[in-house]
Amino acid sequence: MQPGALPEITHYTYRVTWSAEDHEFVATCAEFPSLTWLASSQTEALQGLQGLLREVIIDMEEQGEQVPQPFADRHYSGKFNLRVGESLHRELAMQAAEDGMSLNQYVLRKLRAA
């Protein structure tokens, strides 16, 4: 994202669910987990959160804070490092060998099944 450019509000990751505790719909945004908006309809909850998010982003920009980039606009390499204990590493390597595959293939299969 270019410095000073605001991200597109609609590109953020939203979820609207029913809150039995509040008896209203609650909208959340994965990139801004501390923000929520309650409303009597799903549409109102989403629109309310988007309006709040727009204000928060403008305020962050004015304060010189880093605005989170939407997950949809991020680029992923397909690689990430994962640290596990020595015993788990050994166990996974043995299970992968018993299944006749590389450790990477084995772990990927397990992640997809999760």
Image (cartoon, rainbow, N blue to C red):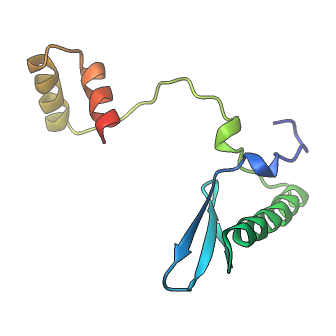
Query: In the rendered image, which quarter contains the N terminus?
Result: top right
Residue at the spot 12% in from the left edge and 26% down from the top edge: 95
x then y, percent, for residue 51? 82, 66
- In the figure, is residue 49 to the left or right of 91? right
**Front residue of 27 and 23:** 23
The residue most toward the bottom is 22
> Does 81 appear above or below 28?
above
Q: Is residue 35 left or right of residue 58?
A: left
**In this figure, what is the number of numbered marks?**
0
How far from the left and from the top, in percent, is residue 9?
Answer: 80, 52
* Image x and y of residue 64, in percent: 85, 55
Work out whether residue 64 or residue 28 is closer to the camera in this orientation and state it. Answer: 28
Rendered view: 86 above or below 4? above
Residue 5 lies in what quarter of the image?
Answer: top right
Residue 80 higher or lower than 65, as above or below: above
Q: Quadrant of the C terminus?
A: top left
- Residue at the spot 85% in from the left edge and 65% down from the top edge: 55
Q: Which residue occupies 84% across, 61% down?
A: 54
Q: Nearer the viewer, residue 49 or 89?
A: 49
Q: In which quarter of the view is residue 72 placed? A: top right
